[in-house]
Amino acid sequence: MKRLWIVLLAMSLLVVGAASAQDAATLPNGVASGDVTQTSAVLWTRSTALGTVTFELAPDAAFSVLAGSATAEVIDTAIPVKVLISDLMPGTEYFYRVTDAAGSVIMGRFVTPAELGTRAGLRFGVSGDWRGELAPYASISNVAGRELDFFVLHGDTVYADFPSPALNKRQAETLEEYRIKHDEGYSERYGQNFWADVRASTSVLATIDDHEVTNDFAGGAAPGSDDRFGASDAAYVNDTPLYEMGLQVFQEYNPLVDEFYGETGDPRTANERKLYRYRTWGSDAAVFVIDARSFRDQSLESPSVTTIEAVNAYLAQTFDPARTMIGQQQFDDLKADLLRAHEAGITWKFVMIPEPAQNLGPVNSDDRYEGYAAERTALLRFIVQNGIQNVVFVAADIHGTIINNMTYQEAAGGEHFPTGTFEITTGSVAFDAPFGPTIINLAAQLGLLAEEQAATFRNFPRPTKELLLGQFINAQIAPFGYDPIGLDESEIDAELLDGGYMATNTFGWTEFEIDAETQVLTVTTYGIDPYTRVELDADPVAIMARVPQMVSQFAVTPK
């Protein structure tokens, strides 16, 4: 059936391509499905033709029998339309067809999760961080062919505060400008639209990081703490116009149900937009999608000059129990749902948190969970005390893949307690420069590396770069008692199959696959050589011809 789907998708693209140029352009961002449950899904598109858009659903790629249909009206061509389809069957592959008022037609596919008690295996992808000027993103060109069950769009899905070809200004400031940024990322460029291919091939789950609004914002802080949000009577940044515009357009451009918290008893979350999701895929996996930006306290200022006194003072502040990164309501929901998944006998639990939760050292940790250490400890302690096994944290944001086991402390400088959990950060789809060269340049600027050493490093082959960078990071975190990068010295039953436990010099994405019988989790990171905007504009054909290759793979046997 999947081969038939691929053939029919290709035929549908040919049909659209055979239409007039105007008709072919009326669905510029393709189609998408998302927020899928065992019995429902959101279907999405954006049409530049005013009028009715029809969504049709079938359990076969030939559409011999319809399983549902719905319509939506395009009244503003800048605003996408979406519909919620219900009464679906669990564990079922569906195909959908989108027809707009101009007659353009595009097909898509998604799979509903299996019911609890089923172990059918699972394969999904994760990535984040793509800038508009680096489109159309060859680093994800192999995703559509992987027949994934879903794909997580893990924050920084636009860079509203970076100039790009579609909006050459430092910060989007209106609804129209935010829409331009989202349209840019999901549109064709240089004759390719790899995101359209991905979103037609599988359903998506999406959350924000910071650049959907503006860099490193804290939604639970007072507007007066950040002059980018202007004069405001709002109590929190998450009620200011700039935030509201960014979140509104993010919601518009992703196949998400509009959900809001009720009266939570906490003014920073009460009646606010809810991006937290708890989804289960049979008894193979539970997925928890976190909004780590909208409710967080103002970040501390991490020490850039690492004197012992400055670092110790900073670390002590991070253990303030009054500070939160994800907000009390979301924290409570996450704990309750982790316990539900554990009690239901679900094997793997994936906590999708946009910023890293592993300890990477004090420098620049203020924006990560390290900067909110008391809450991080409370979460990890809860997992340990309740015997919740096979928890995997999946993060993005730092533009590179780093895998490590997780420990926690009760206080700064205290004993490190193992948790049996680990984290993998996924590299950027396209952010110049990736984590590896960024860290080397930063080390040279801080005087931790001589410029000659940094220049030599840049000329090494990729495996050597990863090895040396890992040694450099380990040297920085060892004084704090943090475990070295990787899973070799942990209690995780892991086997490295290809590459290493770091992949920080590529653009790419990460695939997670659970074997139906053994429940072994195989994690594969794919990547391409990074490129700059100048390189892309100079020779787009050569850049788009880069094929994602496996750069890291390991397998974990569950407890």
Image (cartoon, rainbow, N blue to C red):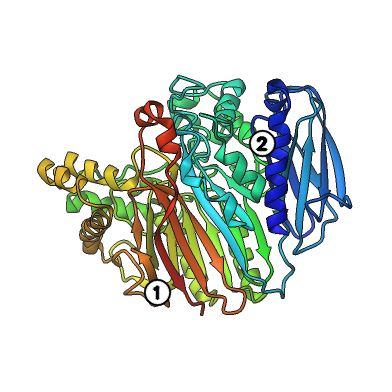
In this view, the residue in front, 254 or 475, is 254
Residue 75 in the figure: left or right of residue 515 = right
Mark sitting on residue 516 = none
Measure how far apart labels 1 and 2 are at the Cα level.
Answer: 39 Å
Decide if residue 17 is in sight here.
yes
Residue 437 pos. (x, y %): 27, 44
* Image quadrant where one finds the N terminus: bottom right
Residue 205 pos. (x, y %): 62, 50
Residue 239 pos. (x, y %): 59, 32
Residue, disc 1: 495
SS state under label 1: strand
Q: Amino acid under label 1? A: Glu
Residue, disc 2: 30
User: Which residue is depicted at the point 63% across and 49% down?
Assistant: 204
Residue 59 in the figure: left or right of residue 159 = right
Closest to the camera, between mark 1 and mark 2, is 2
User: Which residue is depicted at the point 60% across and 26% down?
Assistant: 179
Q: In this view, does 391 lie above or below 305?
A: below
- Binning the other alpha carbons within 10 Å of mark 2 as few (below 14), some (14 to 19) or many (20 upward) gives many
Residue 407 in the figure: left or right of residue 468 = right
